[in-house]
Image (cartoon, helix red, strand yellow):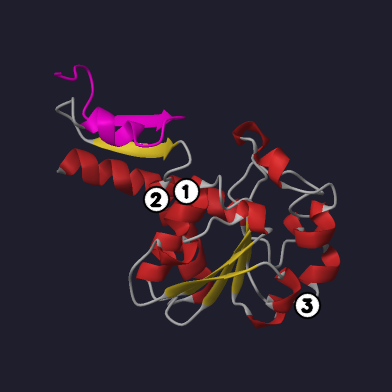
Amino acid sequence: IEARGGDAIVVRTSISGGAALGAQHVDRPVINAGDGRHAHPTQALLDALTLRRRLGSLSGKRVAIVGDIANSRVARSAAHAFVRLGAEVIAVGPPSLVPVGFDAIATGPGKISITHDIDSILCDIDAIMTLRIQLERAAGIGIAPDYRAGYGLTSERRAKLKPGTPILHPGPVNRGVEIDDAVADDTADSVILRQVSCGVAARMAVLLRAIAD
């Protein structure tokens, strides 16, 4: 199929693999802006950029990804990016939301480990990303009513982090569920708004590269 009227195509779809399928049938670069539960590559780029600006090199850093990992394309892409950059990714969540084998999805100098006890790792991580509970992808049946008590990044848990630990969230945020308002809005350590700014830069770079090629 010949694509007319544009130099690149941005695809966001609920179908896993949808962007790759589209790329097989058009003669323009296709940018994956999120496909089902599979991947969200530009989100991973902006998250990596956000952390690099805050921490410098990610080699040897420990980054926790907490929450609905089973339904999160963000978690998968972030794990690939962070491991490729040398970080240790710690996938944290209830057993129903951390898929078996997640610790083997990425290759690189870093690694992935899994734990179901968020409190056991808080004092020994360099960054933490909380994920939205994705009710539209049936995550609601996989969590208990006391999810916040078990896995939410509350003010009490935030106090256990090392000083200056950056706090990320890909948005949109279920406030008071995966993260408390006071933590999300903290101007010292929450980098959620910086993620948005980095997203503009990262996606501009992807578009430029796609068009230039």
Q: Amino acid at mark 2?
A: Ala
- Along the viewing direction, whichever of 31 and 193 lies nearer the viewer: 31
Where 15 sits versus 160, above or below?
above
Q: Which residue is mark 1?
A: 199
Q: Amino acid at mark 3?
A: Lys
- Helix, strand or loop at label 3? It is loop
Say if mark 1 contacts mark 2, CB within 8 Å: yes
- The answer to which image quadrant residue 95 occupies is bottom right
Horizontal and vertical percent position of residue 162? 70, 80
* Foreground: disc 3 or disc 1: 3
Name the disc covering residue 160, or none: 3
Name the disc covering residue 190, or none: none
Horizontal and vertical percent position of residue 118? 71, 69
- Helix, strand or loop at label 1? It is helix
Q: Could you give the CA–CA distance between mark 1 and mark 2, rounded to whole angstroms? A: 5 Å
Horizontal and vertical percent position of residue 127? 60, 71
Q: Is residue 144 left or right of residue 122?
A: right
Q: Could you give the CA–CA distance between mark 3 and mark 1, rounded to whole angstroms? A: 29 Å
Horizontal and vertical percent position of residue 119? 75, 73
Quarter holding the C terminus is top left
Span colored in magenta: 1-23
Residue at horizontal 14 percent and vertical 27 percent from the top: 27
Q: Is residue 8 visible?
A: no
Residue at horizontal 84 percent and vertical 47 percent from the top: 145
Badge 1 local density, few (<14 within 10 Å), some, or many (20+)? Answer: many
- Whichever of callouts 3 and 1 sits on the residue coming sooner in the sequence is 3
- Along the viewing direction, whichever of 149 and 125 lies nearer the viewer: 149
* Foreground: disc 3 or disc 2: 3
Q: Is residue 105 magenta?
A: no
Quarter holding the N terminus is top left
Residue at horizontal 65 percent and vertical 82 percent from the top: 124
Q: Which residue is mark 2?
A: 202
